[in-house]
Amino acid sequence: MINIAGVVSIVLFYLLILFVGIWAGRKKQAGNDSEEEVMLAGRSIGLFVGIFTMTATWVGGGYINGTAEAIYTSGLVWCQAPFGYALSLVFGGIFFANPMRKQGYITMLDPLQDSFGERMGGLLFLPALCGEVFWAAGILAALGATLSVIIDMDHRTSVILSSCIAIFYTLFGGLYSVAYTDVIQLFCIFIGLWMCIPFAWANEHVKSLSAMDVDWIGHVEPKQRWFYIDYGLLLVFGGIPWQVYFQRVLSSKTAGRAQILSYVAAAGCILMAIPPVLIGAIAKATPWNETDYKGPYPLTVDETSMILPMVLQYLTPDFVSFFGLGAVSAAVMSSADSSVLSAASMFARNVYKLIFRQKASEMEIIWVMRVSIIIVGILSTIMALTIPSIYGLWSMCSDLVYVILFPQLLMVVHFKKHCNTYGSLAAYIVALFIRLSGGEAMLGLPALIHFPGYDEESQTQLFPFRTMAMLMSLITLIGVSWWTKMMFESGKLQPGYDIFRCVVNIPEDIQRVGEPSEAGEQLSVMAGPLGRSYGAATMAGKDERNGRINPALESDDDLPVAEAKRLNQQTAQQQVQKMLSNATGQGSGGGNLQGGQGMAVPTAEHDNTAF
């Protein structure tokens, strides 16, 4: 029988999230439907909202439900995700946030396509898409489990309903709606769960957590140590190359602020994990057959995935459980939106625009993104309805991202001169083969290779094969890139064999984005107050530098428009006079200005757009 009070609670919190999402969407500049405005909120996310939305990168439905489930089933030592994802934010802030934000990328795939070409970037989009869909599916599955406990609604119905609401306001407001609903989301989780913990802990059926028969700490068997380390590294470094993270980084006003947000959000992840850890421990200390719970005991896999809503439902008073469950449900719903927006943004920009429709208008790209939001939402909903374990689904998200994307993103951000498209493709194939050969019991994928220590009974690879796949991918990327460069530049392979056109067979009209300081003597207008009015390096169009905005070339000061125009015109006139004098000095016969003082076009070192 449907619980009317529970329905009222859910409706109220859903309306709150929906209202905030629509209100935030109105902050978007009227008539401005550019990629930057919709995908990155105009790079105007402030410090307060930025802290909350960066923390909400990982803190959502899968996070709180999965953490409580892990505590109940395996103990605290096996609940690695909160600590792993917190460390991923720290390392992301140290090594990736600053260079990515300075270059002014719009999506995480931009540097990959810049180094490896549009089509290779499209191939790298696939693991990123899988990761986002799996993550959103885990969140929606958590929501379905929660609502089935609160109001006795079929979880399929609740998942589909919640997905539709999240998709609606994401379509309406883009990242503005995502960011501002994140603020409400975290407040709901924090207040709702902490309100419920004292009542649950004081319930007469809950034993003392220090009792000998209540092992909520857990332990790691000696044979599982390498598996434990492998899983930890997967969470730490596999948690970096996600568009949901770089979406927040790239929407920050400055590179320095992006780093600060990463560090603060790491602390927020640990703080927000405390309530579900306590709830999982309380559940472990509860003999459920003595409560009003009427299901199977000991709990099966289906019940353990709902352990957090079960604690709130059966161990707290009605008025407390309604508030806690309603708040958590609304919060869970609002955390699915960022993954859906991330996947849609990458497809619209990095696949549709840069591969198929280079001349597509901004409005066309935005409409493609909106259609993609609907499609990704449907895929995530299907996954949420077909895979049972929330925590397993959540942890599986990082696998392909870790072994394929992390080594490639690391190289293009810090060592892009030492990698090329040949190495990228070879590394992709190697990583994919090793990961798939290890099998995945949750998907019914058998292990093709039994690595040392393979457990036949549980069909588990105890060998750290994921980290091995990542390292083999990194070595392959470096080795194949070095070998192909050496073979082509030494003449052992003719330029005609450079089919990806990334070593020696480079088209003359291709340019790459390098560090701003490496572009030679730029046009002085680029340092001017309104440098944004000119093509950043190529004069190709407004706000474009190889297809993306580069805020590193913009002034952080908001000068009055009239004053900025005057200064900009003055510097432009001076530059034109300088160009004319240089051309006159060189004569009319054959001065090649490319790469010299008179032109802002740096000679390209590589090109990979052909692949």
Image (spheres, grey):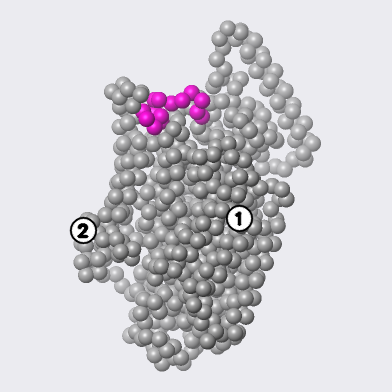
> Residue 120 location in percent, x, y?
42, 40
> Residue 429 location in percent, x, y?
32, 45
Which element carries disc 1, helix, strand or loop? helix
Placement of the C terminus among the 4 image quadrants: top left
**Measured Cα–Cα span from mark 1 to mark 2:** 44 Å
Picture layout, residue 147 above or below residue 171: below
- Between residue 392 and residue 568, name the one nearer to us: 392
- Looking at the rendering, the stretch of residues picked out in magenta corresponds to 498-511
Three-letter code for the amino acid on which mark 1 is drawn: Leu
Three-letter code for the amino acid on which mark 2 is drawn: His
Name the residue carrying label 2.
450
Picture layout, residue 506 above or below residue 425: above
**In percent of the image, x 44 and y 88: which residue is there?**
293
For residue 284, say whether it is visible: yes
> Residue 60 location in percent, x, y?
51, 66
> Residue 305 location in percent, x, y?
42, 75
499 drawn magenta: yes
Q: What number is the disc on residue 108?
A: none
Q: What number is the disc on residue 175?
A: 1
Horizontal arrangement in the rendering, residue 539 relative to residue 382 (left or right): right
Q: Residue 598 lies in what quarter of the image?
A: top right
- Between residue 274 and residue 248, name the one nearer to us: 248
